[in-house]
Image: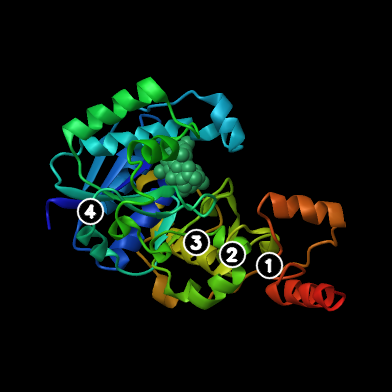
Amino acid sequence: MTDQAFVTLATTDSYAKGVMVLGKSLRNHNTSRKLVALIGPHVSETSRAVLHKLYDEVRLVDVLDSGDTAHLALMKRPDLGVTFTKLHCWSLTHYSKCVFMDADTLVLANVDELFDREELSAAPDPGWPDCFNSGVFVFRPSEDTYSKLLQYCTEHGSFDGGDQGVLNSFFRGWATEDIGKHLPFIYNMSSIALYTYLPAFKQYGSNAKVVHFLGKTKPWSYTYDPKKRALKGSVEEASSHPSFLLEWWSIYSSCVVPMLHHEHGDQPFYSGCAGSSGCDEETLPPLVPAALPAPPLSSAERKQRWEQGQADYMGIDAFANIEKKLTAFLKRW
Ligand code: UDP
Ligand code: GLC
Ligand code: MN
């Protein structure tokens, strides 16, 4: 399948870490498709060298920025104007069909069946399910679509200041026209699902094929102790399930860090990680989340954390506790 590819994007070295782990996770699950990384000019030579080892094609693109601070402020993500750069993926016309995946996604199983879908197939956004989430989508590169999309951006901008707003306006039939274009949520399981619908996560989470670390805090924002194979600090504050974060870190520390060392000779991206060459996933001890006790929070602090998507789902906000509270409340009526 040389004319089909998975495509991703990094404009910075931080997002490049995500691209490296994503590429390795696709290879680990034996994809038969090509892997393409779009990168911006600020990605360092060291990162580029590693990306060349993991990806079939590493393509330098201009950074496109919506510059739309007003709409981005509504999402509390001023950094996402550059996601317009994603639109370059329609220019990859040497492929007949592609699947775009955000740099903050991780593949948990082979997902090559996504290529059976048509443009524009995507999963619902957990925040507004009549919009699709643009972290994973199937598309057909085309000069015609590419120029129409850029034109559309110039004329109408984006309602969220990022690519997701403009893509939802451009492919506006998605919500109602063809259910075949609705990808099951397991192909883009946003970490947000944990605190918006925990029972469904408990029921279906194990079927997930792609996890998306959507939101401000990314896997690479945490600190990891490779000896204990645990995240440092309070995992209860994590906006994503610790086991997915640990899976991400397992690939990063065992496969990516040795490649970065090999390219750079020291430890520019991660210090204190054991192993200097090759992948040593097999020999590492089992993963353990570091369960550090968090100081008690006031009710106002807890409310604020909930609203910021930082539920303590392993502790006080656990499903069992919420259920207990609801039952007690209902009994009163
Ligand atoms: N991205 C990038 N540089 C940035 C911000 C975003 O390369 O400074 C790319 C990257 O592929 C990322 C995607 O755009 O995964 C969307 O951004 P992000 O995943 O942070 O958005 P979220 O899914 O959290 O809304
Ligand atoms: C979203 C998507 C992301 C997109 C961003 C900006 O939340 O997850 O892929 O880049 O919004 O539109
Ligand atoms: Mn994302």
Looking at the rendering, which quadrant does residue 282 occupy? Answer: bottom left
Helix, strand or loop at disc 3?
helix
- Asked whether 174 or 83 is in front, the reply is 174
Q: Residue furthest front?
A: 333
Q: Residue at x 28, y 33 (%)?
A: 60
Query: Where does label 3 land, which residue?
Result: 249
Helix, strand or loop at disc 1?
loop
Q: How many marks?
A: 4
Q: Marks 2 and 4, Cα distance to the nearest angstrom? A: 29 Å
Query: Where does label 1 land, which residue?
Result: 313
**First in residue order: circle 3 vs circle 4:** 4
**First in residue order: circle 2 vs circle 4:** 4
Above or below — where is 79 with respect to 17?
above
Query: Is 55 displayed left or right of 243 in the figure?
Result: left
Report crowding for label 1: few under 14, some 14 to 19, many 20 or more residues within 10 A (C-alpha): many
Q: Does the CB distance between marks 2 and 3 fall below 8 Å?
A: no
**First in residue order: circle 2 vs circle 3:** 2
**First in residue order: circle 3 vs circle 1:** 3
Q: Position of residue 270 (x, y in %)?
A: 52, 51
Q: Position of residue 277 (x, y in %)?
A: 37, 61
Q: Quadrant of the C terminus?
A: bottom right
Q: Does the CB distance between marks 2 and 1 fall below 8 Å?
A: yes
Query: Where does label 4 land, which residue?
Result: 118
Residue 194, numbered circle? 2
Helix, strand or loop at disc 4?
loop
**First in residue order: circle 4 vs circle 1:** 4
Above or below — where is 3 with respect to 94?
below
Q: Marks 2 and 1, Cα distance to the nearest angstrom? A: 8 Å
Q: Marks 3 and 1, Cα distance to the nearest angstrom? A: 21 Å
